[in-house]
Amino acid sequence: MSFYDKVRGQKFLSSTVMIFTLSIGILIGTIAQTGAKAAREQATAPDATPLTIPNAVMMQNEFTKVAKLLEPSVVNISAEYIPKVTAHTNAPQSRVVPRRRQQQQDGDDDDNQGNMPDFLQRFFGGQGGGGGMQFGEPEEQRSGSLGSGVIVDRNGYILTNNHVVDKATRITVKFMSDDTEYPATVIGTDKDTDLAVIHVDKKNLPAARIGNSDALQPGDWSVAIGSPFGFQATVTAGIISAIARDVPGGEATTFQHFIQTDAAINPGNSGGPLANINGEVVGINTMIASRSGGYQGIGFAMPMNTAVKVYNQIIRSGHVTRGSIGIQFPADDGTSQHTALLKVYGAEHGVFVKEVEPNGPAEKSGLKEEDVITAINGHNITKGQDLIDLVADSPVGSTLKANVIRNKKPMMLDIVVGDRTKIFPAQYGGVKAEPDDNGPEPTAAQMKFGMSVQALRPGERQSMNFKKDGGVLVASVEPGSFADDITLQKGDVIVEMNRQPVNAPEDIRKIQGTLKAGDAVVFHVWTQTQGQRGGGTWVSRFASGTVPAQ
């Protein structure tokens, strides 16, 4: 072996030894460092055992079952009001809705001790829980609200509150399992119970099970589901605190006898379901008693038995018809003053007749002011609400046998029940004309497209100087509606719709029933140049457009 080979071998051996030694050192250092670190970590809690996550096991209870059963039937409702500024000379003027005492027909009068207290709040939930449409807000302001609803028919029919969709220009619905926003149309509303029926064009929906609210008792479990502050699919539980609860509010709450619950309800829950422990809907959440605007343990829901009656009438005719006999009575029934009043007039109980509506059913039957109604069809009347509930549920045209005391002498009268909206049209947005000898007084009928119309009597045609045959009068037009978009105006007279003659409101309703989204519609109308009833020149024109999708 040459000298050069020896040197090269020794260098290789030295390098190998060096690398091996370095590797051993690194390994020993790593082990020592890891041990030291472990020792340090173990020293923090030397007697602690690391935690482990167990396998998922679903916990089941009755509330879980209710939530799973009902959640798919609950929807989120967004309603938007977009005012439309028009140049119509007689377009509806903006107004502020005051909180004032209102006279109650077939009920108490202006002696009532005020409207709904400030702490009774209906649920307008703005985005994220803020804002929203408020009582007393000028109508010309753009606004919106969030609410809830419950599917009651698999073909897209939804129950909610009237105040959720009232005056809305655009309504959209979202389902729990679908992020798509579906446009909705209002089928009908009932302000007396604050209920509304809306519809979306979607089939095979999971309809909720309907329960009998008459079976409820204080202390029963209750579950509320909705979208408080916009948080969809929120479930809360509590108990039924009271049933048949009346809240202050005068005329506005005449037909509202609530279920009271302490299940947490907040803005945005409005229109959502209140369920029993079996998952059956027994109420529609409507308002709360709160001094803060949020949950304080007192919520009110409209009983489902009432909601079913309202729903069935709306899907049948588009509105709710209630009976009335056309009287007014003092609001203080049940007080010592009222008891004294009855005794003076010779009655132990009953309703004192303060006023009788001219030409109404009561007047036609012979009922007079200062009479006392003590019974209807054999049912004793002890307070005004007894009379209201019994008469309102009686079919229009049916005859009631009323026990009456007049001048301390008993007598019996037959009273034919009338339509409450026709006896008191001003209360329901109708137009009541001055009486004449040319037929019954007309009332406005609500149509689709955001308008209401009424029949024209001969005497009214004369006072308006409208000499054409047929036609119906446009009584109102909602700002931002389809009717407003195609320039229909309050005070117009519609004589034709899609070339078919219009002689009564029912003619328009029949033609509307044949139209669907995208169809063309043409109204032949007569308009006064000055835009006021009773003056100006009548001009023929056409109002046309395409039926909107919603």
Image (cartoon, grey):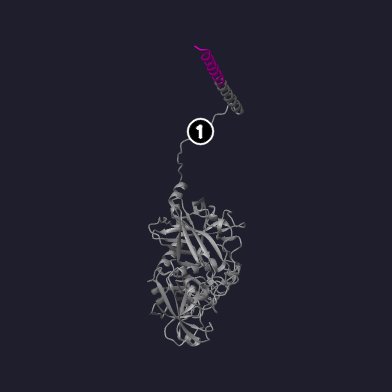
Q: Bin the neighbour count of mark 1 within 10 Å (Cα to Cα): few under 14, some 14-19, many 20 and up.
A: few
What is the x, y in percent for residue 26?
Answer: 57, 23
Q: Amino acid type of disc 1? A: Thr
Give the side of residue 428 with respect to residue 547, left or right: right
**As rendered, which of 187 and 38 lies closer to the eye?**
38
In this view, 390 is above or below 262:
below
Magenta stretch, residue numbers: 1-22
Please count the marks in the image. Answer: 1
**As rendered, which of 147 and 377 lies closer to the eye?**
147
Residue that appears at 42% across and 83% down: 470
Question: Would you say the magenta stretch is mainly helix, strand or loop?
Answer: helix
Give the side of residue 458 with respect to residue 99, left or right: left
In this view, 476 is above or below 178:
below
Residue located beneath label 1 in the image: 52
- Does residue 289 appear anywhere in the picture? yes
The picture quadrant where one finds residue 117 is: bottom right
- Does residue 193 appear anywhere in the picture? no
Q: Is 20 a magenta residue?
A: yes
What is the x, y in percent for residue 40?
Answer: 61, 26
In this view, 269 is above or below 327:
above
Q: Is 433 a magenta residue?
A: no
Residue that appears at 50% across and 69% down: 388
What is the x, y in percent for residue 362?
Answer: 48, 77
The C terminus lies in which quarter of the figure?
bottom left
The residue tagged with tag 1: helix, strand or loop? loop
What is the x, y in percent for residue 547?
Answer: 43, 70
